[in-house]
Amino acid sequence: MQSERKGNNKKKNMKAYVFPGQGAQFVGMGKDLYDNNAEAKEMFEKANEILGFRITDLMFAGTEEDLKQTKVTQPAIFLHSVLLAKSLGEEFQPDMVAGHSLGEFSALVAAGALSFEEGLKLVSKRAMAMQKACEIRPSTMAAVLALPDEKVEELCAEIDDIVAPANYNCPGQVVISGTIEGIDAACEKMLAAGAKRAMKLKVGGAFHSPLMQPAQEELAEAIAAAEFKTPRCPIYQNVDGKPHTDPAEIKENLIKQLTAPVRWTYDVQEMIKDGATEFVELGPGSVLQGLVKKIDRSVATDGRQ
């Protein structure tokens, strides 16, 4: 059951911590943490052992191509984000958390619903499963700018191939996902309908679409077997944009997330409705801070990377 909202007991200056997803990576990410924080260094080395390769070498001194590999990207962003939260110590007092796609796993570990080790294993499993699903059928994604969400949905439904909204990032910015032929046809329709841009993205496949079904089936078993606890604060999950604290519901939503769209706009709107006045992004880049501002300019944003 969704966590109850305490609309009449809202605290002033409620803080939401948000965690980025794939695409935020950069060469050198996490090196400051490794060099200057003994606990972070120890956990980075533990991650190298768990993964079976030195991901730290790729994060700190690899090439951009190294970091673009899904099997590297996802655990790298997860590590950077989770260890940033850990490094804050007592300063990390979230009233609510959320993560964009992969970032949902970072948020769950930071909020105490998953152990660091278990979270990393699930993220690695997810990355491998998604990579395999991408290889089964050529597919891609495209960003559509300046069309209402409903129009994007309507046009996707008109395409004969598999095409679906994948990320509702902010008003006027929706990413669609599907077969290469389907995305090409959809982009033409979007532009004809008045989209400012409809541009294909440099990604390995159709994330958050029905084409991720093989990955979903593989990950479902691992998530079901993992131990989830009640998080220290509600997590606003991508599949419905609502706050959750029940471990069984959280698991179910994580499984659904692979083939369902990331409803980031709704996540942020719901957090603001429930009292969030400041959003702090933990992880590489500052994409989420920008999206939050596009959703609601009145809230404060900050970030650590």
Image: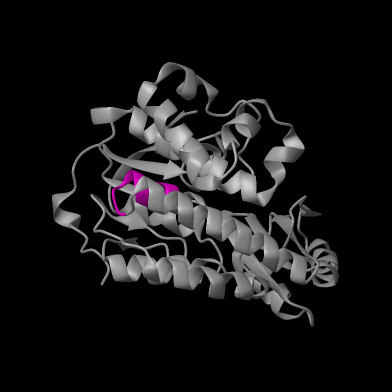
**Residue 30: in magenta span:** no
Name the colour scheme: one colour
Q: Residue furthest top?
A: 36
**In the rendered image, which quarter contains the N terminus?**
bottom left
Task: Reply above or below: 153 against 42.
Answer: below
Q: Residue furthest left?
A: 9
Task: Reply above or below: 149 against 124.
Answer: below
What residue is shown at x 39% (from left), y 48% (from top)?
117
What residue is shown at x 78% (from left), y 71% (from top)?
137
Asked whether residue 229 is in view, the answer is yes
What residue is shown at x 57% (from left), y 32% (from top)?
56
Asked whether residue 293 is in view, the answer is no
Q: Which of the pair 188/37 is nearer the observer?
A: 37
Q: Which of the pair 97/120 is nearer the observer?
A: 120
User: In the visual, does 8 lie left or right of 127?
Assistant: left
Whole-percent x, y for residue 156 in the image: 71, 74
**Residue 111: in magenta span:** yes
Task: Reply above or below: 231 against 250.
Answer: above
Whole-percent x, y for residue 259 in the image: 58, 71
The secondary structure that most of the magenta stretch takes on is helix
Whole-percent x, y for residue 10 in the image: 19, 48
User: In the visual, does 7 lie left or right of 160?
Assistant: left
What residue is shown at x 33% (from left), y 70% (from top)?
249
Quarter of the view holding residue 291? top right
Quarter of the view holding residue 258? bottom right
Quarter of the view holding residue 216? bottom right
User: In the visual, does 254 lie left or right of 273?
Assistant: right
Whole-percent x, y for residue 289 in the image: 50, 37
Q: Number of numbered discs present?
A: 0
Residue range highlighted in magenta: 106-113
Q: Which of the pair 237/250 is nearer the observer?
A: 250
